Image (cartoon, rainbow, N blue to C red):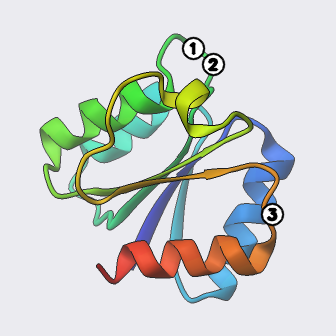
C-alpha cells in the first residue's frame, strides 16, 4: 500500500513518513499541493492521500484532494490539521473515503486512523 504524504514542514513530514514506513506502507512525499498533484497525475500507485490542510503555494489540502479525485475518483484521503474540522475544511462536506485528524495526535491514534481508512 502506498501513501502520498503532503506536508510542508520537513520535520513533521519526516516523523509521519517514518511512522508510515514502520507500519509497512511505501511513502511518496511532497511539500506542496502542486508537487503532490504531479505525482497524482503520474502512473504511480497511490492508495491514500495524506495531506495537511494548510499548504503553501496557493493550493490547500482540500483543493488538492478535490483535484486528486478528478484523476483518481476512489482515492482515499486523510487530512491533518492544527484546526478543528469545521475551521480546517469550512462548511465543505467530506466525501466517502475521507477523514480528518487534528494535531497534535499521538502515533498510535495516527497509525490506527491510517489503517482504518486504508482497509475500508
- Which quadrant is the N terminus positioned in? bottom left
The answer to whether residue 2 of the structure is visible from this angle is yes
Q: Residues within 10 Å of mark 3 (few under 14, many from 20)?
A: few
Identify the residue at horizontal 62%, vertical 87% (top origin).
Answer: 23
Q: Counting residues from the N terminus, which is met first, the one under dot 1 or under dot 3?
A: 3
Is residue 55 left or right of 69 when viewed as pictured? right
Which disc number belongs to residue 15? 3
Q: Are marks 1 and 2 in contact (CB under 8 Å)?
A: yes
Image point (46%, 65%), residue name:
3
Report helix, strand or loop for mark 1.
loop
Q: CA distance from mark 1 to mark 2?
A: 4 Å
82 left or right of 30 in image: right
Across the whole image, how many numbered discs are drawn on residues?
Answer: 3
From this view, report whether residue 25 is shown above or below residue 85. Answer: below
Place of residue 120 in the rendered image (x, y in percent of width and height, measured from the top left)? 29, 79
Closest to the observer, 10 or 115: 115
Rendered image: mark on residue 57? 1
Q: Crowding at label 2, few (<14), some or many (≥20) Cα neighbours within 10 Å?
A: some
Residue extending furthest toward the right: 11
Query: Is the residue under label 3 in contact with that under label 2 (CB below 8 Å)?
Result: no
Q: Do residues under tags 1 and 3 come within 8 Å of each other at their CB atoms? A: no
Of callouts 2 and 3, the N-terminal one:
3
Disc 2/disc 3 C-alpha distance (Å): 19 Å
Residue bearing mark 2: 56
Q: Residues within 10 Å of mark 1 (few under 14, many from 20)?
A: few
Q: CA distance from mark 1 to mark 3?
A: 22 Å
Q: Is residue 61 left or right of residue 67?
A: right
Left or right, residue 12 beside residue 22: right
- Can see residue 20? no
* Residue 117 location, quadrant: bottom left
Q: Residue at x 66, y 70 (%)?
A: 110
Amino acid at each position: 500500500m502506498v501513501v502520498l504524504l503532503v506536508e510542508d514542514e520537513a520535520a513533521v513530514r519526516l516523523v509521519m513518513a517514518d511512522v508510515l514506513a514502520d507500519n509497512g506502507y511505501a511513502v511518496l512525499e511532497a511539500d506542496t499541493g502542486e508537487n503532490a498533484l504531479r505525482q497524482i497525475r503520474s502512473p504511480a500507485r497511490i492508495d491514500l492521500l495524506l495531506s495537511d490542510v494548510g499548504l503553501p503555494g496557493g493550493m490547500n489540502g482540500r483543493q488538492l484532494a478535490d483535484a486528486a479525485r478528478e484523476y483518481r475518483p476512489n482515492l482515499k484521503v486523510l487530512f491533518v490539521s492544527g484546526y478543528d474540522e469545521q475551521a480546517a475544511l469550512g462548511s465543505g462536506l467530506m466525501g466517502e473515503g475521507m477523514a480528518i485528524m487534528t494535531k497534535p495526535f499521538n502515533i498510535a491514534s495516527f497509525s490506527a486512523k491510517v489503517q482504518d481508512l486504508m482497509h475500508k
